Every structure is written in structure tokens, then in C-alpha cells.
Image (cartoon, grey):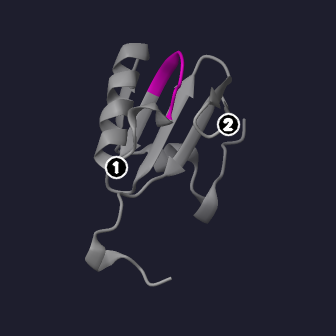
């Protein structure tokens, strides 16, 4: 079976190496809230259901989550519907300080 190959020829396993991983709905929910709070996001920004696994590699900003089934959520405040796959990942960085903000 072929491995999922991502940017720079790294596999998903390579990207997850050295990460903090938690399992189970309650632990994943708690871990996700802590992570979002660290980044300054509101608690309801990721309204995920039935999380089975989530993890984070602090050094690289790589995060991932797995849930039992795909989930769609309607955000009333923005009148938008968002779909979450069973597995998703992203590289996330904390917000810039005033001195670090790039000129755009």
C-alpha cells in the first residue's frame, strides 16, 4: 500500500513524528480547546463531533484530527456551512507579535 506523500516528499507519518497525540472524544476535545486558546481562537471555531485522535507537533506547527465520520456545521453568525472530513491536518502558527508582523 502506498503512503500518502505530501509536500517536500514527506509522508504523513514523517510530519506526525515527535508529536503529542491524544485519543478519545473527551481528551481530544480538551486538547483542541487548549490549542485553540493558545492561538487566540474562540472555543467554537472547530465544532467537531466524535473525535478519535488528535495531535500536534509543537516544533513545526503541524496538527491533525480524526473523527468517526464527516461532519457539517452551520455557523449562524457568518451564515456559512463548513464540512469537516474524517481526517484533516494543517500547519498552524501562533499570531505574529506587533514587531514580527510582515509588511503587506
SS label for mark 1: helix
Q: In this rendering, which labeled residue sits more in front, label 1 or label 2? A: 2
For the residues labelled 1 and 2, the Cα–Cα distance comes to 24 Å
- Locate residue 33: give its quadrant: top left
Name the chief secondary structure element in magenta.
loop
Q: Position of residue 48 (x, y in %)?
A: 53, 25
Q: Is residue 65 left or right of residue 1?
A: left
User: Of residues 71 and 10, which is closer to you in this image?
Assistant: 71
Q: Are marks 1 and 2 in contact (CB under 8 Å)?
A: no
The residue that appears at 50% across and 82% down in the rendered structure is 104
The residue segment tinted magenta is 46-53
Of marks 1 and 2, which one's residue comes earlier in the chain? 1
Q: Which residue is mark 2?
A: 79
In magenta stretch: residue 51: yes
| Percent of width and height locating residue 59 | 32, 56
Q: Is residue 82 left or right of residue 62?
A: right
Residue 77 vertical placement versus 6 (above, below) = above
Residue pushed farthest bottom? 103
Q: Nearer the viewer, residue 7 or 39?
A: 39
At label 2, counting other C-alpha atoms closer than 10 Å, the crowd grade (few under 14, some 14-19, many 20 or more) is few
Res. 35 image quadrant: top left
Residue identifier under label 1: 39
Seen in the picture, residue 69 relative to 3 is either above or below; the reply is: above
Amino acid at each position: 500500500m502506498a503512503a500518502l506523500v505530501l509536500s517536500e516528499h514527506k509522508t504523513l507519518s514523517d510530519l506526525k513524528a515527535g508529536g503529542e497525540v491524544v485519543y478519545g472524544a473527551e481528551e481530544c476535545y480538551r486538547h483542541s480547546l487548549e490549542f485553540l486558546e493558545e492561538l487566540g481562537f474562540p472555543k467554537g471555531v472547530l465544532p467537531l463531533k466524535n473525535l478519535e485522535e488528535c495531535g500536534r507537533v509543537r516544533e513545526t506547527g503541524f496538527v491533525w484530527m480524526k473523527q468517526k465520520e464527516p461532519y457539517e456545521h452551520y455557523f449562524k453568525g457568518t451564515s456559512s456551512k463548513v464540512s469537516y472530513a474524517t481526517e484533516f491536518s494543517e500547519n498552524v502558527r501562533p499570531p505574529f507579535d506587533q514587531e514580527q508582523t510582515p509588511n503587506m
